[in-house]
Amino acid sequence: MLVENNVALQPYNTFGIVARAQRLARVRTEADVLQLMDSADWTADTAAAPPFVLGGGSNLVITGDVKPLVLKVEIAGRRLLEETAKGWLVEGGAGENWHTFVAWSLEQGWPGLENLALIPGSVGASPVQNIGAYGVELQDRFHSLDAIDLHTGKAFSLDAAQCGFGYRDSVFKHAPAGEKGLGLAGRALITRVRFWLPKPWKPVLGYLDLERKMAETGVSAPDARQIFDWVVAIRRAKLPDPAVIGNAGSFFKNPTVNEVQCADIIARDPKVVHYPMPDGSIKLAAGWLIDACGWKGKSVGNAGVFERQALVLVNRGGATGGEVMTLAKAIQTSVYERFGIRLEPEPVVI
């Protein structure tokens, strides 16, 4: 397969940051990976650093030209594997656009992913981040995935337990700790992902924005397509379109605290937005914390905080990855100094 040299990466990251890949290979089939690993250049390309697996580029901040070999995942395919009285098992190629896959599943009459509509990125990246929105996380619908070990070339599959899902977290975001460490960062290339959509379908509506939509429309029992349309409308109203203004969606994770910490923050800032969690912890709205520190609409160089949602950092035109990260660190400092909370970025920084 052809490995391209000196490839512009601006079209492949939703932040629209200008950078180049020293070498880039487009992976369209599992065989492409094996062919690449068998090539004479593989050892040289991966000697200094493991290859960088690139999906939709929607959760990425590039701070300079990328020297590791870039594997651009473009594996296509969507299909129903099984239907039983208990549900549907559907599969998507890792290179499929996530939102397109969600819309397709609904069009086929297989509901269950509607709350995850309009999340940018690819099907293959969805389990890496354990994407989630409006009361549903990927792990709630995940069945299994196929991947290739970039050290050995062997194919393997993982179920939900083996993926080690956490809040915006998975085994794919952690480097192995020791010889038998379970981390797969830099080692695995996901090729296909399967989702279990249970019957009978039940709507997930326990989220404030969806409750508002129900009140506004008078629809108390929405179907899956209605929820899909509501989620799309809500996200479009709150979040900038990467095709118009570069961004990586929510830049920081919503932090969690215990009851004592939350009570302390509420005593000082009674309006803090917070959500009790099933495990007894309390999730704070990172966007509210950032807004309370006065960052909404502010900029550092050409990187800024979106005017309608403080959780989103944007490229106002020509922003570098360095400017984005300088802004992010300044926000982290402000939030820590005021609330004693350390915000953790969601995107991968390379």
Image: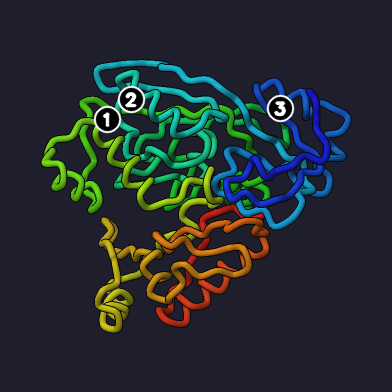
Residue found at x 43% / y 75%: 294
Q: CA distance from mark 3 to mark 2?
A: 31 Å
> Which-is-in-front pick, marks 3 and 2?
2
Kindly check if marks 3 and 2 are in contact, taking CB atoms under 8 A apart as contact.
no
Using the rendered view, name the quadrant where residue 161 is placed: top left
What is the three-letter code of the residue carrying label 2?
A: Leu
Q: Determine whether label 1 and label 2 are within 8 Å by CB.
A: yes
Taking the spot 57% from the left edge, 71% from the top edge, the residue there is 329
Q: In x, y percent, where is residue 234?
A: 32, 47
Residue 157, given in percent of the width and then of the height, sits at 54, 29
Q: CA distance from mark 3 to mark 1?
A: 37 Å
Q: Tag 2's secondary structure?
A: helix
Quick one: label 3 or label 1, which is nearer the N terminus? 3
Point out the tag, 1 or 2, that comes first from the N-terminus.
Answer: 2
Circle 1 sits in a helix, a strand or a loop, which is it? helix
Label drawn at residue 106: 2
Give 227 or 316, whichever is nearer the viewer. 316
Pointer 1 local density, CA inside 10 Å: few below 14, some 14–19, many at least 20:
some
Q: Is 269 situated left or right of 212 in this image? A: right
Name the quadrant of the N terminus: top right
Point out residue 146 in the picture as x, y percentages from the top left corner.
Answer: 55, 28
Residue 33's mark?
3
Q: Amino acid at mark 1?
A: Arg
In this rendering, the answer to whether 251 lies above or below 74 is: below
Q: In this picture, is 327 found above or below 309? A: below
Where residue 117 appears, x then y in whole percent? 38, 37
Q: Secondary structure at mark 3?
A: helix
- Tell whether label 1 touches label 3 (CB within 8 Å): no
Q: Nearer the viewer, mark 3 or mark 1?
A: 1
Image vertical order of residue 152 relative to residue 296, above or below: above
Task: Pick the residue in front: 76 or 49.
Answer: 76
Disc on res. 225: 1
